[in-house]
Amino acid sequence: MLLDYQNTSFEVKAARPEIAVLPIGATQQCGDHLPVGSMNIILDELSRRVAQKLSGTVYLLPTMPLGTSGLHMGKPGTVALEWSTLMDVVYDLVESLVAQRIHQVAVINGLGGVTETTVRPRENYIIKTTVRQLNYDFPQLDAIWVQPFTVAGQQLEQIIESARVDLHAGELATSLLLYLAPETVKGKGVDHVPAAAQEYWDYVPFDQLCPDGVCGRPGLASAEKGEQAMQLAVRETVTYIEESFAHLATMKRRLYY
């Protein structure tokens, strides 16, 4: 059963959701072909599909539309939070869920990608620290974070040809928007992969690496790829969330009993 902000407080109380899903997005430049709210558009639909497939009664929160976006500060349309502000916001939101006895919270933190791992967020790095602190402060809470196209793993490379160099506004995001909201895509975008080795990408100003606001190959995008990538990410995210909560339950039983 799925509940969200369109339900009444009385309906939420009666349903007694066991799990909450909190998507964290961003509003930032995405080249000349994608809207600044690209991540939020994608996360709105992806998170809803994930919440619909999770076992039990799920409370889906609205997508938090602002992240840290440090690489894109100063670019037109980009609005962002300091990492400490985002940490406080997410902490407060989860604390409000704990107050109503929702003790399983899955934070869907941006999109991720095939070159990332489940121990290091690509977007909004502070979310990992926030989740760790919440679990420490509230022993009754099981909070996790997940990036959908990271847990999609190498299967994503069978769909997105340039997955290994797709960092921002490239083939993946463009394909997803061609599938979900084609009216928001303005042209093909500029294919650009920095000459610098990938280990330097996080340490060089983004506009110096990618002056057109794109890191990847949006020219390879298609709606068909977007649909396949979305289906894969939803399936793998549901699996990751359910397996993580089951693992945490087993660990706590061993610890306390």
Image (cartoon, rainbow, N blue to C red):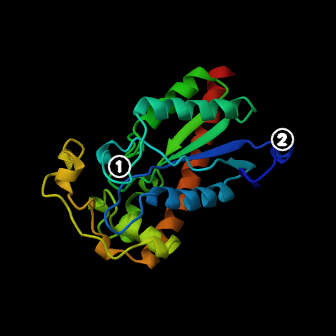
Residue 52, picture quadrant:
bottom right
- Residue denoted by label 2: 13
Does residue 198 appear to the left or right of 167 in the view shown?
left
Mark 1: give few (<14), some (14-19) or many (20+) Cα within 10 Å: some
Residue 221, picture quadrant:
bottom left
Residue 95, picture quadrant:
top right
Eyeballing the image, is 241 above or below 90?
Answer: below
Q: Earlier in the sequence, mark 1 or mark 2?
A: 2
- The answer, for residue 250, to whether it is visible in the render is no
Circle 2: element type? helix
Q: Exactly how many numbered labels are in the figure?
A: 2
- Residue denoted by label 1: 116
Q: Which residue is drawn at 39% across and 46% down?
A: 123
- The answer, for residue 220, to whether it is visible in the render is yes
Q: Residue at x 23, y 62 (%)?
A: 212
- Type of residue at label 1? Glu
Name the mark on residue 130. none
Extreme-left residue of the structure: 195
Q: Position of residue 42 (x, y in %)?
A: 50, 61
Extreme-front residue of the structure: 76
Could you say which is closer to the camera, residue 223 or residue 86?
A: 86
Q: Residue at x 46, y 36 (%)?
A: 127
CA distance separating discs 1 and 2: 38 Å
Eyeballing the image, is 157 above or below 109?
Answer: below
Eyeballing the image, is 5 above or below 189?
Answer: above
Q: Quadrant of the N terminus?
A: bottom right
Mark 2: give few (<14), some (14-19) or many (20+) Cα within 10 Å: few
Q: Where is residue 175 in the image (x, y as percent from the top left)?
A: 41, 71
Q: Position of residue 211 (x, y in %)?
A: 20, 58
Does residue 64 appear to the left or right of 189 in the view shown?
right
Q: Position of residue 149 (x, y in %)?
A: 44, 57
